[in-house]
Amino acid sequence: MTPRPPGAHLPEHPDRLWSAAEPKAAYDVVIVGGGGHGLATAYYLAKNHGITNVAVVERGWLAGGNMARNTTIIRSNYLWDESAGIYEHALKLWEGLEEELGYPLLFSQRGVLNLAHSLQDVRDSVRRVEANRLNGVDAEWLDAAQVKEVCPIVNVSPDVRYPVLGATFQPRAGIAKHDHVAWGYARAAAALGVEFIENCEVTGLRVSGGRVTGVDTTRGAIAAGRVALCAAGHTSVVAATAGIDLPLQSHPLQALVSELLEPVHPTVVMSNAVHVYVSQAHKGELVMGAGIDAANSYRQRGAFHIIERQMAAALELFPVFARAHVLRTWGGVVDVSPDASPIIGLTPVDGLYINCGWGTGGFKATPGVGWCFAHTVAHDDPHPLAAPFSLDRFVTGALVDEHGAAAVAH
Amino acid sequence: MRRENGGRIDRSRTLRFRFDGQEYTGHPGDTLASALLAGGVRQIATSVKLGRPRGVFSAGSEEPNAVVQIEEPFPEPMLPATTVELYDGLVARSLAGQGRLATEPDPARYDAVHAHCDVLVVGAGPAGLAAARAAAGAGARVILADEQPEPGGALLGSPDEVDGVPGAEWAAATAAHLEGLPDVRVLRRTTVFGYYDDNYLVAVERRTNHLGAAAPAHVARERVWRIRARQVVLATGAHERPIAFAGNDLPGVMLAGAARTYVHRYGVLPGRRAVVFTANDSAYAAALDLAEAGVEVAAIVDVRTAPGERWAARARERGIELLAGHVVTAARGDGQLSSVLVGATGDGGRSIDADLLLVSGGWNPVVHLFSQSGGTLRYDEALGTLVPGASRQAVQPAGAAGGVFTLPGCLADGAAAGARAAGPHAGPHAAEAPRAAEPEATNAPAYWLVPANDYSAHFVDLQRDVTVADIHRATGAGLRSVEHVKRYTTAGTAHDQGKTSGLLTSAVVAHALGTSVAELGTTTFRAPYLPVSFAALAGRDRGALHDPVRVTALHEWHVAHGALFENVGQWKRPWYYPRPGEDMETAVLRECRAARESVAAMDASTLGKIDVIGPDAGEFLDRLYTNLMSSLKVGSVRYGVMCRPDGMVLDDGTVIRLADDHFLVTTTTGNAAMVLDWMEEWLQTEWPSLRVHCTSVTEQWATVALVGPRSREVLAGLAPGLAVSAADFPFMTWREADVAGIPARVCRISFSGELAFEINVTSWDGLRLWTAIMDTGLVTPYGTETMHVLRAEKGYPIVGQDTDGTVTPHDLGMSWVVSKKKPDFIGKRSFTRADTSRADRKQLVGLLPEDPGFLLPEGTHLVSTATLPEPPVPMLGHVTSSYRSAALGRTFALALVKGGQGRVGERLYAPVAGTLVPVTVTSHVLYDPEGARRDG
Amino acid sequence: MLLIPCPWCGPREEAEFHYGGQAHVAYPENPAALSDEEWARYLFFRDNPKGVFAERWSHSAGCRRWFNALRDTATNEIHAVYRVGEPRPVTS
């Protein structure tokens, strides 16, 4: 009989999380969307700004959207200064978050490798590493042999279709357990007085005289002094009820896990050219994702050929995965912006704030978004780190284009 | 232990295998689980969290317990022993939660196939076989897929008869009949695991697994079937569900139907003395069959106070004690079951010795694929389970999958579903349903949970070690959604994805919250239905087939002459041609000198080439390019830049006018397909009135760039009929001529600043042309690296290297290429936006490191101060290209720098490896700024 | 993998197609006459409905024709396809 492997199960959740609330008639702030961003925003509204008469309104179950569906990669090694600012702020918060929330988040700074497969990938990678360093973000450029040292199962043979020429490495990057993060925020926010209203879909925003007055929901109208949208893939639908158009397109993004496996993969590997990203989660399952489905859709389900391509990419990079099994696939709906950067800030409607456009990469930003968006809502003024991500940039052209030289947008 | 006879195993052959280091034997037709049970092995796994012993719980793919690691012939993690067909030489071991991947490469092949059919029938049990027969009889093209090695489904595990013959025989005959039909395909060992939009289903066929080391290497081990079906019949059967009671995880506790299957199908007695714990009639058949086979059945414990009368009578006839209105309050034993505690209430009671406890809490239709198809599920109070509701696609359940649990019912339901699915094909000869004896049906209320004071050993999810107590802890923490409870406890997330535990979890949560399963719902059924290997899904799209490899007509020559290659898009391009003893730097400096001082040649065939033809071709190109193309004269060539509507550079290249209505556009190597798409999109969706056609001709032409002061001399020698003088053949014109006896189009263009000719011939003649050029003995071959150096010395940008989607033509110092005359072109409007018209945008400049031997790494950033402040450090821009220049006798770089065009002469600093390297900003044109060399 | 009925070729696998986003967004008649706000709307803003969406597809691995489709983004059901230049069909 084999001994029981360590780590094949997770630490227990606390005995008490939160209580489901019935909607009250009015709140100071209603947050639309009980995902990671909504929960973190609620927490920091209460914690940093003393605003506790807050309801988080969620159409399904708390943190059941993209928060429950992402591949939990955390990193801050983005190219542009604006991105580095907010993602690095988030990473610094991650580094103290278990203590802050008093919750085991399984935050594991195991590093992230972004592989380079062409000479242009190498140039872009070095550019990003150098920018990261000057922005105070830890980053290293590794050659193929060093990649192999960090992650011995990566196939660095020159005889593959797109050989690994090197990688950027952010040692402080890593993963966390998404449910634990959401529940940690929810529990801490609940303790400060925030209420969670589940199975309550916002069907409309109430606007009067250019100012938001509340939300209509499937459980009745709720008045609100301020409304903060954290509705991810459904942001367009909600915002449209207040006549606000946003430059967003909603797409399915799929992910999958394998069965539990003995530890083989010590870090996180992402590749753009051989498109896949992989980590091995705490219990031992391989967690993987790739690109979005091309066509707009609100179905939390993608097409299967995307998964097949992802598996081909995975085996190019990791031949040892051949006989691992796909246990479960799923999809979320992500809201993609034109420059692959988020939109955070004020709207043409007074008291209505948006936080959207995170596309495939919202999880890693959770604490940073919560912090900055709460500030934006509390002060009716964008947090300095959020200011570059205003809606106005699409008019001026001052995009934060993370398509080109950034790594896989995730 | 093995029965003396019976079962669908081939007793004439013995297979040897090892499990946990012990040698065992079995027979063809066995699974690893049946052979281990025959060998008396009770414990097959250790639970992941609590380390408890676990045995075989089921006889199929729903197995939550007996998950094993295959070690030989090749390691494969986590397979249910109930699904591993036994083969000679199998080596497996028990698992404790985590499987092991092989460290060596998997030698097996995998592939995929597309298939189309009128009717796909999933499952070849009684309902599926009846459905396939009916659909095929009506003339439909049918695919029948079943995960087992032989058809029959539940019939293989029972003595029931169909059409007067034993069910397994009927199944074999029916399958043989179907296989004889021209438009029917019967897929064995094939699990349909995903159901997607528009009746697209995905299956995996295990073709050689069951052969072990004897598997032929040339046959794909697993094959993915991508099936598009007009109609789907889901005859996926039902899974028996467990009951939660104390100790229900002990080896020896088994689903009742599974025990019956071991007896009939595998000729195995899973124990000697059994107790049966049931809430319905079906377990009586199991009890009677086991008793008939020689198992001592000590008692039937039926939660109902009034069990079905005929079944009760038959049990009593057989001498089996019937304890109606009783429950099993605990299963006991040390490492395996030794006794069962039975009582009228939830606690205590009478102890009965037993090494086998059969459990049946009822049956759950296998609704996974139906749910995946978008169909709704309905909780059926009478059946105590989820059954298919409204469907969204052309699909119907049949038999047990639809909640029909009698054999004649399944046969009739299947036949009807098959006929309906055949639809318009159904003729008057639609098959009659096969017949079987009608059993009596009695009420079987849902029963989930034996009440107790202590729920810490009432297991709900055996593989994840989740108990009723764990679920109560989750609901006690405030959780109200079954999805939350799943995540809190991890119930349903294991290898079996909750096949036996999912509904039970919902029921226990509903019970705890005082609500109903119907109200609460269940978690989502997600693909794949069964775990599928990564390798099967990757199929053949690996290695060289992962992405097509494109090579030019000259590729063989490059290989033969020692070129190293660079991947550019899908193309393999010669990077440089090192001579013996040369490193890259030496080789590239030599190649550069040849181009600047003598003559050199490059294979430029990979540049995209698009024929743009039609009366409106000039107008069309005027709209796409920033500069004017319609004014180009036939016989001339012009460089052009295309932008996106947001004003950022999209691509660049030359445009040749071949005739009034015929242009040839070249693109960068990597963007060829994108530019063609771009042109067609604008033409078709915005300007359909323009009479223009675009055709890719990239692969039709081989292109050689002949570069250097002596290029004219070489060309003149090869093309005696061509007037090559600067006057006769001016810059930016083209001529047709025979070059080396090959009809060619020769362009006088230059991407190096030197006198240069681009010679185009058909791909067929490419190698002949190249060889003729090399045979002059004057010409040095050069690769992409030298090309990059030469163009950088002249300040020519490479789209994608010196641009990144945030750069305008103005930023590149190419305002001259932006027409001021044209009222509009794609991108023009964006140039006046606030951010795009800023004076301090990043602009392309040259950089000269103050140390002329220092090579700036590409990607290095630039700062204005001689010391670095604390982060975040304000950055002025970055190095896009950096080389050693033979012509300049020093290093140089191109960079995008904020307000760079106004900084010429300024000193900036480049942080490199902890030091700040001083550099001077210069014009981006570093070599021959007067353009004196292009005419030679 | 959708089965997309190309109006020129008939039903074909989704993998043969290239997606083109919202249909009926015409290139402005006179971009120079637009304000920055109006131009930004053309550049970046596209409808994103949950429900029936008029969208563009190109049968890029087939006939290479662009066409339009009415697809429900909540269900992926394609209600109609029509050629470029044809009006958006009325669907119930």
Image (cartoon, coloured by chain):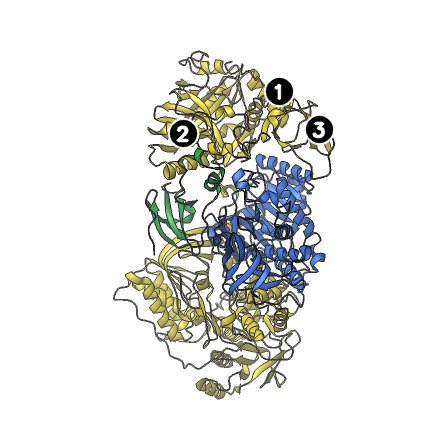
Chain colours: A blue, B yellow, C green
Could you say which disc has been placed on residue A34 in the image?
A: none
- Tell me, yes or no, whether dots 3 and 1 are on the same chain: yes
Q: Look at the image and tell me whether residue A282 can be seen.
A: no
Could you say which disc has been placed on residue B886 in the image?
A: 1
Chain for numbered disc 1: B
Query: Are the residues at dot 3 and dot 1 in contact (C-beta closer than 8 Å)?
Result: no
Q: What residue type is labelled 1?
A: Ala
Taking the view exactly as shown, the residue that stands out farthest to the left is: B428
Q: What residue type is labelled 2?
A: Leu
Chain for numbered disc 2: B
Q: What crowding class fits label 2: few (fewer than 14 Cα within 10 Å), some (14-19), or many (20 or more)?
A: many
Say which label, 1 or 2, has the lower sequence index: 2
Whether B588 is drawn above or below A208: the answer is above
Q: Which amino acid does label 3 sit on?
A: Val
Drawn side of residue B798 relative to residue B911, left or right: left
| Residue B498 quadrant | bottom right
* Towards the viewer: B21 or A72: A72
Q: What crowding class fits label 3: few (fewer than 14 Cα within 10 Å), some (14-19), or many (20 or more)?
A: some
Q: Which of marks 3 and 1 is in front?
A: 3
Residue under circle 2?
B621
Q: Look at the image and tell me whether residue B442 can be seen.
A: yes
Residue under circle 3?
B917
Q: Where is residue B668 in the image (x, y as percent from the top left)?
A: 49, 31
